[in-house]
């Protein structure tokens, strides 16, 4: 594994410490490799050899794992790593062009990944979970949202400024004194909020409060769901209406704070008045303008524009936007772990709340009146809850299978490996409702008889992992989980395993293989994990959202949950809404709501006044549903009837500027790349489908390809081993069914949407006034030949079809499309 040319300074004690922390068995290989890469930023061969010497891990195991999971790197990287999101929402919003712009700005060759100075390395990742703020990218641990081609240089300027500041705002000031007097400023600090700049906003709020000697606390809250409006802050004052401000900028904060809170100290009052007079004198943002731009009092006084929130019902996301996600005490005060107590004692006795407040283990309590495992399972069956991970299998039945399976040792697993590009529901729930997930796991452990649980979470979700780790510690210290759950003598120990970047590990048997230190290869079922799972023991695997539903159902009763939704699809479903939509974010809606209601009422319609074309449901495993089927209810049965599937819940909206054929190529590229390669239909079938789609987008396809695509798609669907392969053709099969005319146009060498770069030309007509604006924004030096006040020309050999020139032309002299098409994209794309 090592090379004589490899030079590495490493401390053998570091490797020994990593092994000591993670174990020496073969199952420890992934955590050990993750720890080594975190330390050295890649996997040095000499370090891996040392691991083999110290453990039972074979070199072949390390090689197999390191080459299977995309997280691992075997070559050194630059000083900083750029992770560019290539998820569906980012792809739709132009991630490929952003990649090229980053490479051009940093001087990275398009076939390389690191600049000559080895300062930056760029890599594509499946999804960063910030889909409503697409395109998104992360530099080291700093995430940037809504990145555009022209904003790439400012992004790196901001990052280097942060580096110079030591990573962020000054945190060396002494803590500000705060008091609980009914007033607070709420700020969401989940991943989307941080990507939108809320961490900077929090620092500005803290500074503004410090300037007026205010004791008003800043409260971190759970996801506000309005990702399209971040940064969001909410001002709460006793006896006054709540005020919410959206898309806030740092320069607005002083005015917002002074609008609601007055300085107490006379000298501070004088100073504040002088500052406000100075700001007014020199033309800073006035109060009326600030309110017009940012006021959104939507919580207590919903207005027509706030239907994004008013049509939602919050169960998995209960207490949205006002619950501190890191406070166990607040979760307990809001009814947290009452469902667990109900199962243990037959009624809520406040045991968890009291033990948490006392800071000691709960005293022994009798469980004679507690619910039996059978009663807990029956409650799940009566509720009609179905798995929210994609397949929709009845949750109660799965619990029943594990409960009845023979075996002394049983496991429960929370599947948080949210690999669908374009989905971020699990990320939000893990970040905002960690205690609720733990409560759901604790209840499921009582139902199936497990005393050990594992949360398998994507490594791309560091904040979710961090908050879940702390939540587990908090619950252990409070005696809620551990050796003696709330004094009952029952045990549940939880730990976290980070995924290593493999979409296929969302499949249950592949996930189990990963937990056992193997390549994530699905196995033939039966036996199902409920009978023979982790280490050969009966294993219950539930999706994050499914577990978050459980406490609400137990507290409120199965019948109340079953009142929501449709006859066979009960309750609510959390979706991520992104793409070409005005109002994107997290939504939790009753099953049976129509696609049109989601797009028009909740999403606010298509952005930029364009036409709704289609919705991609369920990620790469779902389907492409045309606008003409907008009245289709969103539930398991209705989606299946039209050839799609619920999937995990990613909803990507397309408008009339999006190409269906190109989207199919994107999805097949993803599933083919993520195929584990174990079975031939998936490994070879998806590759051949991708090749045909690539030919179509390049104008090299044949009409016979369309029949072959359909035929091959059915073969892959029917003969693949696991769910990834069986559902991989869904986007293509539904697209061929509902958008066949678009495929035929590509066979004829035309892309009606003007998206497939191999099928479109750009040219300039004689209305050009020679202003050179197009040349100024073009990222390619020799693409546009421009002489002031003369007709410009475009060199198609070097043109990257980035569309930068189209919107800046003042006379709409730049045309894009196929020259023999009757309708061309003029002045826009």
Image: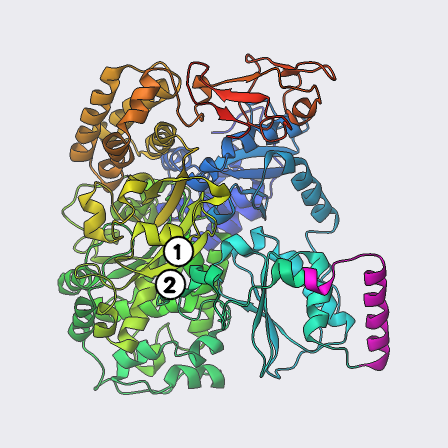
Identify which residue is drawn at 70% across, 76% down: 261
Residue 332 circle label: none
Q: In which quarter of the image is residue 709?
A: top left
Instruction: State the count of labels.
Output: 2
Instruction: Give the residues drawn in magenta, as a range.
Output: 265-289
Residue 311 circle label: 2
Rendered location of residue 658, percent (x, y): 41, 33
Neighbourhood count class around disc 2 (C-alpha, 10 Å): few under 14, some 14–19, many 20 upward: some
Would you say the residues marked 2 and 1 are in contact, meaning their CB atoms lie under 8 Å apart? yes
Identify which residue is drawn at 28% across, 22% down: 688
- Please say whether residue 484 is one of the residues in the magenta stretch: no
User: What's the CA distance linking mark 2 and mark 1?
Assistant: 8 Å
Along the line of sight, the residue nearer the viewer: 719 or 486: 719
Identify which residue is drawn at 32% across, 71% down: 551
Rendered location of residue 799, percent (x, y): 56, 18
Residue 601 circle label: 1
Rendered location of residue 696, percent (x, y): 34, 19
Along the line of sight, the residue nearer the viewer: 584 or 632: 632
Q: What element carries label 2?
A: loop
Residue 393 sits above or below residue 222 on the image: above
Horizontal side of 511 relative to 42 (left or right) equals left
Q: Which colour scheme is used?
A: rainbow
- Please say whether residue 266 is one of the residues in the magenta stretch: yes
Q: Can residue 603 be seen in this view?
A: yes
Horizontal side of 445 relative to 42 (left or right) equals left
Q: Which of marks 2 and 1 is in front?
A: 1
Label 2 vs 1, first from the N-terminus: 2
Q: What element carries label 1?
A: helix
Horizontal side of 201 relative to 428 (left or right) equals right
Q: Quadrant of residue 662?
A: top left
């Amino acid at each position: 594994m090592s090379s004589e040319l490899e030079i590495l300074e490493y401390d053998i004690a570091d490797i020994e410490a990593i092994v000591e922390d993670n174990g020496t068995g073969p199952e420890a290989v992934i955590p050990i490799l993750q720890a080594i890469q975190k330390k050295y930023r890649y996997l040095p061969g000499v370090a891996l050899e040392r691991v083999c010497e110290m453990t039972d891990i074979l070199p072949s195991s390390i090689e197999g794992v390191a080459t299977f999971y995309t997280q691992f790197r075997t070559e050194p990287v630059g000083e900083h790593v750029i992770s560019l999101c290539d998820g569906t929402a980012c792809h739709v919003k132009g991630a490929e062009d952003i990649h090229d712009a980053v490479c051009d700005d940093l001087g990275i060759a398009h076939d390389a990944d690191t600049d000559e100075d080895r300062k930056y390395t760029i890599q594509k990742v499946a999804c960063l979970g910030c889909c409503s703020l697409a395109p998104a990218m992360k530099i080291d641990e700093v995430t940037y949202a809504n990145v555009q081609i022209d904003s790439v240089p400012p992004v790196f300027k901001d990052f280097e400024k942060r580096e110079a500041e030591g990573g962020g705002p000054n945190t060396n000031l002494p803590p500000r004194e705060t008091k609980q007097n009914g007033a607070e400023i709420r700020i969401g600090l989940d991943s989307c909020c941080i990507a939108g700049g809320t961490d900077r906003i929090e620092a500005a709020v803290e500074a503004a409060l410090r300037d007026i000697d205010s004791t008003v606390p800043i409260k971190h809250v759970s996801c506000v769901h309005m990702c399209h409006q971040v940064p969001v802050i909410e001002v709460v004052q006793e006896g006054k209406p709540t005020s919410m401000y959206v898309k806030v900028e740092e320069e607005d904060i002083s005015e917002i704070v002074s609008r609601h809170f007055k300085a107490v100290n006379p000298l501070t009052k004088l100073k504040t008045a002088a500052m406000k007079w100075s700001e007014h004198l020199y033309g800073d943002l006035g109060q009326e303008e600030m309110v017009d731009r940012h006021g959104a009092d939507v919580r207590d006084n919903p207005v027509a524009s706030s239907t994004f929130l008013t049509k939602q019902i919050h169960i998995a996301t209960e207490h949205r936007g006002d619950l501190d996600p890191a406070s166990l005490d607040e979760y307990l005060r809001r009814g947290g772990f009452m469902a667990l107590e109900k199962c243990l004692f037959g009624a809520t006795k406040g045991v968890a709340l009291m033990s948490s407040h006392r800071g000691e283990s709960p005293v022994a309590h009798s469980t004679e009146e507690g619910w039996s495992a059978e009663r807990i399972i029956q409650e799940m069956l009566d509720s009609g809850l179905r798995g929210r991970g994609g397949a929709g299998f009845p949750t109660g039945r799965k619990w029943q299978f594990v409960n009845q399976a023979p075996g002394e040792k049983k496991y429960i697993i929370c599947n948080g490996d949210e690999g669908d590009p374009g989905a971020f529901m699990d990320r939000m729930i893990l970040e905002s409702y960690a205690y609720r997930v733990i409560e759901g796991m604790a209840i499921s452990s009582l139902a199936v008889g497990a005393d050990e649980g594992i949360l398998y979470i994507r490594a791309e979700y560091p904040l979710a992992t961090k908050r879940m780790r702390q939540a587990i510690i908090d619950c252990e210290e409070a005696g809620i989980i551990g050796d003696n759950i709330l004094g009952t003598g029952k045990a549940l120990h939880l730990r976290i395993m980070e995924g290593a970047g493999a979409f296929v590990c969302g499949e249950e048997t592949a996930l189990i293989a990963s937990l056992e230190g193997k390549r994530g290869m699905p196995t033939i079922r039966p036996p199902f994990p409920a009978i023979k799972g982790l280490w050969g023991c009966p294993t219950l695997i539930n999706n994050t959202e499914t577990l978050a539903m459980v406490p609400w159902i137990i507290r409120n009763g199965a019948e109340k949950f079953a009142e929501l939704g449709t006859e066979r699809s009960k309750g609510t479903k959390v979706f991520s809404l992104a793409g070409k939509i005005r109002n994107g974010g997290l939504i939790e809606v009753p099953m049976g709501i129509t696609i049109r209601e989601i797009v028009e009422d909740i999403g606010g319609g298509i952005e930029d006044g364009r036409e709704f074309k289609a919705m991609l449901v369920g990620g790469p495993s779902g389907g492409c549903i045309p606008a003409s089927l907008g009245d289709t209810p969103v539930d398991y049965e209705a989606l299946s009837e039209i050839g799609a599937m619920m999937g995990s819940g990613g909803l990507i909206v397309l408008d009339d500027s999006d190409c269906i054929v190109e989207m199919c190529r994107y999805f097949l590229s993803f599933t083919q790349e993520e195929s584990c390669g174990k079975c031939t239909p998936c490994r070879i079938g998806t590759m051949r489908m991708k090749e045909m789609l690539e030919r179509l987008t390049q104008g090299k396809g044949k009409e016979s390809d369309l029949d072959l695509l359909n035929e091959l798609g059915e073969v892959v669907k029917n003969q693949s081993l696991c769910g990834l392969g069986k559902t991989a053709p869904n986007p293509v099969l539904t697209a061929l069914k509902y958008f066949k005319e678009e495929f035929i146009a590509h066979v004829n060498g035309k892309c009606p949407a003007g998206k497939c770069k191999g099928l479109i030309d750009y040219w300039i007509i004689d209305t050009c006034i020679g202003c050179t604006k197009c040349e100024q924004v073009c990222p390619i030096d020799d693409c546009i030949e421009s002489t002031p006040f003369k007709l410009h020309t475009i060199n198609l050999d070097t043109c990257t079809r980035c569309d930068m020139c189209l919107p800046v032309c003042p006379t709409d002299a730049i045309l894009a499309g196929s020259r023999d098409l009757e309708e061309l994209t003029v002045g826009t794309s």
